[in-house]
Image (cartoon, grey):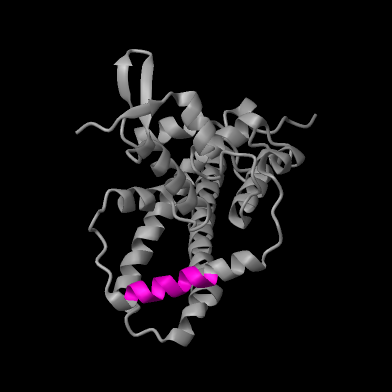
Amino acid sequence: MVEKSTYRMAELVSRSGASREAVRYYIREGLLPPPHRTARNMAWYSDRHLELIKLIRVLQEEQFLPLKAIKSLLNKDQEYKFTPRQREIFAGVLSEMDSQSRRSLPRPPGRKLASALGLSDEDYDQMATMGLIRSSDDPLTRDEEELLRQFAVLRQSGMTRERGFTPQHVEIVQAAADLLFDQELRMFQALLDNLRDDEIPGLMERVIPAINRIFGLLHERKLRAFVARFAAQKNGAAAMEKPSKSRQPRGRRCSPPAVA
């Protein structure tokens, strides 16, 4: 039985709070089913589309899940087999995250902060389409605010649109985060069964920050090694091209002029 489609794109955007670009991105990435089309330029969306968009936004904005994990959840992937004890631990972590969120101060509206940081509406919309920040003008979460601030640092450091740098370049980092997330889940599968209840808050306060710091240090180490190797190669090439001052050019030596 085909579900009745009742919304055009404009109404779906209005009811869900997601942008047109975000809806198209969700469809392209397989988080939403394609709309029902009655003509080439006539697409209809159902209540199911509306429910899924609202769920995706909740999982992103309140549970901090990346889109890859949300897609896995929506598609009922069985890649990760968690024990009942591991599910209890994740529930405890979620409770701690909610507690930290309630203790935090209200965040500023997204576009207002982006403007104050010198970012354009185009930057903001592209970051929202990628799922890095929410697409509405609602207050940001702490991580969304920090993402905006760090992107502003890149802009202020010369990574401008005129030089071809856009939020799409952050997809490389997003892909690395997805890979790290997958590996963390596998690590949790192997190690969390024996975690005590009183150790659960430590996951948020110490374990996860430590993993993030180790990731940052290892990334910085690789970058430094690459830059040092590149600089050494460049200096070596320059040394080979530069003639030595202590040696004369090869060829016939000229006798000094005779003294009269």
Query: Which quarter of the picture shows residue 143?
Result: bottom right
In this rendering, is residue 245 above or below 197?
Answer: above
Which residue is pictured at 63% across the width and 44% down the height? 151
Percent x, y of residue 248: 60, 39
Q: Nearer the viewer, residue 42 or 78?
A: 42
Residue 185 visible here:
yes
Q: Nearer the viewer, residue 171 or 220?
A: 171
Question: Where, quadrant-wise, is the C terminus in this rendering?
Answer: top right
Q: Nearer the viewer, residue 253 or 2?
A: 2
In this rendering, is residue 36 above or below 167?
Answer: above
In this rendering, is residue 199 above or below 12?
Answer: below
In this rendering, is residue 115 above or below 81?
Answer: above
Number of numbered callouts drawn? 0
Left or right: residue 54 compared with residue 30: right
Q: Which residues are magenta?
A: 86-96
Which residue is pictured at 48% across the width and 48% down the height? 173
Check residue 131 for magenta coloring.
Answer: no
Left or right: residue 138 compared with residue 126: right
Question: Where, quadrant-wise, is the N terminus in this rendering?
Answer: top left
Taking the view exactly as shown, the residue that stands out farthest to the right is: 260
Query: Which quarter of the picture shows residue 119?
Result: top right
Magenta region, main secondary structure = helix
Taking the view exactly as shown, the residue that stands out farthest to the left is: 1
Percent x, y of residue 201: 51, 78
Which residue is pictured at 42% across the width and 34% down the height? 25
Residue 250 visible here:
no
Check residue 94 for magenta coloring.
Answer: yes
